[in-house]
Image: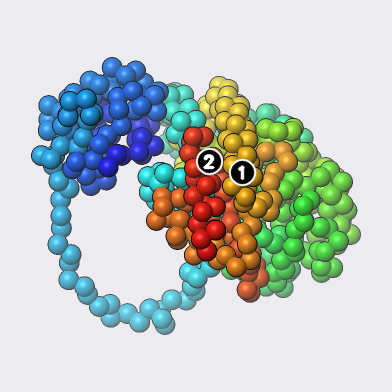
Amino acid sequence: MAIPVETFFLKPDTKGTLQSRIQQMVAEGILSGRFRRGEKLPSTRSLAQHLGVSRITVTLAYTELLANDFLSSKGRSGYFVSPDAPEPPRFEKSAQREDAVDWTRALGQRFTGGATLVKPTDWAQYRYPFLYGQTDPQLFDHANWRQCALQALGARDFAALTRDYYDQDDPQLVEFLLRHTLPRRGITANPEEVLITMGAQNALWMTSQVLLTQRRKAVIENPCYPALRDVLTRSRCHLSAVDVDEDGLPPGDIPETTDVIFTTPSHQCPTSHTMPLARRQALLDRARDLNALIVEDDYEFELAYLKPPMPALKSLDADGRVIYVGSFSKSLFPGLRLGYLVGSAPFIREARALRASVLRHPPGLTQRTTAYFLSLGHYDSLIRRIGKALHDRRVIMEHAIGKHGLSLAGKGTHGGSSFWMRAPEHVDCEDLAQRLRASSVLIEPGTAFFADRTPPRNFYRLAYSSIQQARIDPGVAEIARSIDAT
């Protein structure tokens, strides 16, 4: 069995030469049990191309591992995990003990049981991972991110790295947002109107805590991001779900007594529909008539590679009623957990106080590294590279969907990184996803996105951000065969 080359990733925080880091990467895979005896490693050529290093560097690393009995060589067949390679330690399971605590009574609140999107941690080992929101290591700029992290760790930035900001943020990151990122969305703001968050989801949670009570009413889109629905449900507000159409959230369907409207106008989640300018203005007018606030999650605005992005709702807002949520987690990598809130100073002041009471501020090293990555132009270069790659994959994906007779339910007219799909009515996509996993195919069932008590079960999402171009068509073919066999 061959180990997929996509499972190899040089961690940016490891030290040493490229050769020693590759040795460490392979040895860790063997010692952890991920790579098993007898499994074939990628060729030196393919691994070098995947990692962006010279082939001789990989060859030297393999040779050293060969000398240490981690690998074996079989003539022209390539390199394999050696039959004499160290085995991962095995520990006997400790005896199961019974708690004396009655947790059914001890738990004051429960946070489990909500609709969630479960993604396998080993998704990169699947041959056809049509999963949303994962980083493609072939596209990410590891070298420059590493350099920015090293710069942030330097003596000059010691204070930014180690100080307790309490409720403040890295001034360099905030300044870049104010001078470069927000103006691109047509937004002008002052420092007291910006707050750095631990990703968009953290921003949405703080917004719900500040704005909503048990007496207030909120509107979400249907279907929508499941974690947002869970956040709002736990705020115990009155929650209404409004069905979206091909233009996003219909303003006329928003109930009269609404206090806060949550929307994703750039790329509606999960349909990827983009809200037209006229609809955006109508939504602002509706909010003004209701004296309601709008929380704009500017979801995937950077991935508008087919047409220029539409103006943000916040840029059209003359009343100060739009609260803007942005994130670097999707455009850089999800593990970054860095986003931002933009709103009127009284709102940001309360959100800042809430954040300080819970986590004070996001880590200084993360903020300063991101500030360098943005200010040195690496982020813009990365977005252009990602946009081109996603454009090419989208073309292949759309052709494959048509070729194999699958049905589209929604796609972004400006770009994005996924298609919203509809299977025949009799197909349960939860069951379909389970069957496809046995064929090394990962899809996202759509059930969790819907607020309905009995949601439709024949929708699913196919993302193309984390799958190689060459694997798109055979992966889509496998999905079509599984649907036909249902």
Tell me if residue 143 can be seen. yes
Secondary element at tag 1: helix
Q: Which residue was labeled with disc 2?
A: 473
User: Are the residues flagged by discs 1 and 2 in contact, CB closer than 8 Å?
Assistant: yes
In the rendered view, does 102 fall on the left or right side of 377? left
Q: At which x and y percent is residue 454? A: 63, 73
Residue indicated by mark 1? 403
Give the residue displayed 67% in from the left and 38% down from the top. Answer: 415
Q: Is 279 on the left-hand or right-hand side of 410?
A: right
Please tell me whether mark 2 sits on a helix, a strand or a loop. Answer: helix
User: Which is nearer the eye, 332 or 446?
Assistant: 446
Mark 1 surroundings within 10 Å by alpha-carbon count, few (fewer than 14), some (14 through 19), many (20 or more): few
Q: Which one is in front in this view, the residue at disc 1 or the one at disc 2?
A: 1
Q: Amino acid at mark 2?
A: Asp
Which residue occupies the foreground of this view, 341 or 238? 238
**On screen, residue 103 above or below 301:** below
Of label 1 and label 2, which has the lower sequence position?
A: 1
**Alpha carbon of mark 1 to alpha carbon of mark 2: how far?**
9 Å
- From the image, which quarter does the N terminus lie in? top left
Q: Find residue 440 and report its horizontal and vertical position in percent.
A: 41, 50
User: Which residue type carries mark 1?
Assistant: Lys
* Residue 164 in view in this figure: no
Q: Measuring 59% from the left and 47% from the top, which residue is drawn there?
A: 404
Where residue 168 appears, x then y in whole percent? 56, 42
